[in-house]
Structures are given as structure tokens and as C-alpha cells.
Amino acid sequence: MPAANTGVWYALGAYVLWGLLPVYWKALQHVPAREILAHRILWSFAFLALLVRARGTWSTLATSARSRRTLRLYSGAAVVLTINWLTYIWAVNTDRIVDTSLGYYINPLLSVCLGVAFFRERLRPLQWCAVGLAAVSVVYLTVAHGSLPWVALVLAGSFGVYGLVKKLAPLGALHGLMIETALLAPPALGYLTILGVRGDGAFGYGGAKTTLLLTTAGVVTALPLLLFATAARRVSLTTMGILQYVSPTCGLLLGVAVYHEPFTRARQVAFGLIWVALLLYWLEGVWQGGAAAWSPRSRGQPAQRNPRDA
């Protein structure tokens, strides 16, 4: 099977697993979000440490971790990752899965804005129209519901900033997340220790199923990330960009069809605007790509890549 085809399956596996995460966190709905987060961090760290050891790359990781710039970057990444994980777990377990789906639909367009702000990337008129439609959807939902869709904005914003930091960071997905969870593991362990001493923790006290689910949170976290990292090396960014909407679509279907969250008219309009914006942005990219391929300057020679895309 060609590498590109296997890469698509890896990418689909990653996005479907991310899209089905609400089912996993719902099974732990009786556990406070902060405690779930602490276990997710701690067991992710343990699982990633085993993977690094199995690959025999401890020395490479240790060398990279001595750099102050690397530690500063991954400390920032760890902070926004914590915000993202905590908000997502809390939102899922308080029946806001549809809001989380909206956040991850908005995220790609917000990431575009971050690229403009921090890397001086330029948008074409239709791309600005797509970003504008996303902004209109947020304003409309705010007016219709009388409050900001803060869950969606926090998730989109934190994941967008996380992607920005990771773009500047020097390490791959495995080593990068290893450092991030290593920085977060001591406070997570301290928090869980306090809960255990007080007898308030769910681990070991909430039944075998709860304990097992908390323990395997590390595998659930790391597995889709590793599938994603493998896919990213095998398929084009365009393909990855299209497939990324599998995850919020799964979330939306779960929220509405399985967990019966309300999908009000205001939400329908807001989602509709976001979908139109994403379609417009994608079609503009396809059109520009086709125009570049058929331009006189590009015929007979390979396409030129922006150095920032390398």
C-alpha cells in the first residue's frame, strides 16, 4: 500500500479517536475535571516515558531539555495545554460537547489569524472573508444567547496558541509532549497525593472501572497524537487540513444524537456560517493552487515552497 494511503488511515485514526474522546470522559463524569486532568497528565507522562525508553532516545531528549529556550517554549506550551485539556474535560462532563465542537471548527481560522499576527503571513481577500464569517458567527451566537460562547473561544484560542508555540519549538511530537508532561507531572502528582491522603480521590476508591479509566488516560491521550505525527510525515498538509474536520464533526454528532444536547436555531446559524467560512477558505486555496499550477512561470518546474512552510 502506498505511503500516502497508509498516512490517510493514520490521520483518520487520530481524528476519529479525538472525536470520540467525549465518550471516554463521559464515563468519568462522576470524577471532578481537575482530578481527571491530573491523572491525564501523570499517566501520559508515564506512558510517554516508556515510549521514549523503547525507542532509545533518552540521551537526545536529555540534551534538548538542557536548552533554556527549549524549556521556556515547552513551559508555555504546557500552560496552554493544561487550559485546553481542563476546559475540554469540564465542558464534556457538563453537557457542552456541541460547544467544544464549535471551538475546534473555529480553531483553523483562528490559527490563520495567529499566522498573520506573528509570522506576517498574508491573506488574500477571500481568505479574509472566511475569517470575517467566523467572526460574524461568534457575534451572532453572543447576541442570540446573551453571552459569549466562551468554551468554544477558550478551546480554539488555547489550541491555536499551542500550535503557535509548537511551530517555534525544535522537537518532534513525542519528545515535545514528553517535556510538557514532565513539567506538569510534579504538581499533578502533588494534587493527587493530597486527594489520596484526605480520602477524596477517585483513584482506588471509585471502583475498579474508574481506576482503570483514569490509568489508561495516558494511552488515550498519546495514541492519537502518535498516529497524527506518523500521518503528518506521509500525507500532504492539504489532506490533513481536510481530515481535521472529522474530529469536531464526530463531537457534534455525539453531542446532538447521542447525548441529546440542544442544537438551537442560533447554534444552527452559527455552525452554518462557520461551515461556509471553512468551505470558502478551502475552495480559495484549491483555486489558487490550480492557478499557480497553470501559470506560465510554474509550467514545467516544481512549485516553490515558502521557507516558513518547511
Image (cartoon, rainbow, N blue to C red):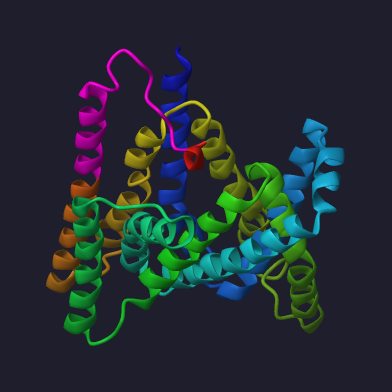
The single residue placed furthest to the bottom in the displayed view is 146
Residue 290 visible at all:
yes
Q: Kindly identify the residue that appears in the image at 33 percent across and 68 percent down.
A: 99
Magenta stretch: includes residue 279: no
Q: Quadrant of residue 151?
A: bottom left
Tell me: 191 left or right of 286: right
Q: Is residue 284 magenta?
A: yes
Taking depth in this image into account, of 147 and 217 the one nearest to the observer is 147
- Of residue 198 and residue 263, the one placed in the foreground of this image is 263
In percent of the image, x 67 and y 60: which residue is there?
Answer: 73
- Residue 203, by quadrant, is bottom right
Q: Quadrant of the N terminus?
A: top left
Q: Is residue 291 left or right of residue 42?
A: left
Left/right placement of residue 141 relative to residue 25 reads left
User: How far across and down, in percent of the image, does residue 309 sit?
Assistant: 47, 39
Q: Which residues are magenta?
A: 282-306
Instruction: Choose top left, top right, bottom left or bottom right for residue 275.
Output: bottom left
